[in-house]
Amino acid sequence: MVNEPIDDSALEEMEFLESGTCWSLLRSTELGRLAVPTPYGGVDIFPVNHLVDQGSLVFRTALGSKLTHAVQAHEVAFEIDGQDEATAWSVVAHGRAELIDSDTAIFDCFELDVRPWHLSHKPYFVRITPTSVTGRRFRIDPSSRSGGPDVSADSAADTGSDTASDTASDTASDTASDKESPWSST
């Protein structure tokens, strides 16, 4: 239930990650989720490949709602997560997303190894400059794994293929659903 009291012992087992650990995890992870507000009061979430560059997060994209909503938003959120056999972790960065549009900055971005999984043309670079980066790690309750999805190393390929197909379908709908220029209403 939503209104159940929080068990204080569970909070004691949660580790709040230091900033350096959060940035290390951001560097070690290829895929994250970008959350952007929509003009209609909702939130869209897009899987994106990213890189850490000079204290910011950079990703590539095509024209579409992801680009438009990200650069028009006052604030976006970017989340990564992961797990091993005993623990799970999550890192969330909040900040402003900006289209990288100066010739020098674009040229510098081509030096970055940002490789989207989807093969479509993604000519635009976006930089998220975080105003906050937070993370947490906790022990996984072993009893929660019974009957749930297999999170062993053997199932990692299955999980990855689901993510890749989600990314492909997201990108197709993103580029097909919103062909307006990201600069049209700024």
Image (tube, rainbow, N blue to C red):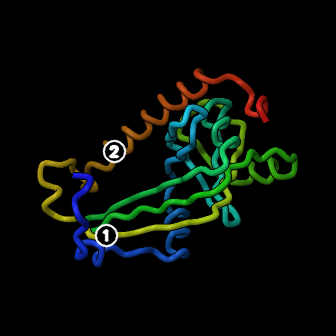
Compared to residue 141, the image places residue 162 above or below, namely above
| Residue 167 place in picture, x, y as percent | 48, 36
Considering every residue shown, the one lying at the far front of the view is 3
Q: Quadrant of residue 108?
A: bottom right
Compared to residue 65, the image places residue 94 above or below, namely below
Does residue 107 appear left or right of residue 64 in this picture? right
Q: Quadrant of residue 132?
A: bottom right
Circle 1: residue type: Phe
Residues 32 and 38: in front is 38
Residue 159's disc number:
2
Residue positioned 58% across, 22% down in the render = 177
Residue 138's disc number:
1
User: For numbered disc 1, what is the local secondary structure?
Assistant: strand
Among the two numbered marks 2 and 1 on one chain, the one whose residue lies closer to the N terminus: 1
From mark 2 to mark 1, how far is it between C-alphas? 21 Å
| Residue 118 place in picture, x, y as percent | 54, 35
Compared to residue 151, the image places residue 44 above or below, namely above
User: For numbered disc 2, what is the local secondary structure?
Assistant: helix
Quadrant where the C terminus sits is top right
Residue positioned 68% across, 59% down in the render = 129
Other residues around mark 1 within 10 Å, as few (<14) / some (14–19) / many (≥20): some
Residue 118's disc number:
none
| Residue 3 place in picture, x, y as percent | 25, 56
Residues 169 and 108: in front is 169
Residue positioned 78% across, 29% down in the render = 184
| Residue 152 place in picture, x, y as percent | 24, 56
Other residues around mark 2 within 10 Å, as few (<14) / some (14–19) / many (≥20): few
Circle 2: residue type: Thr
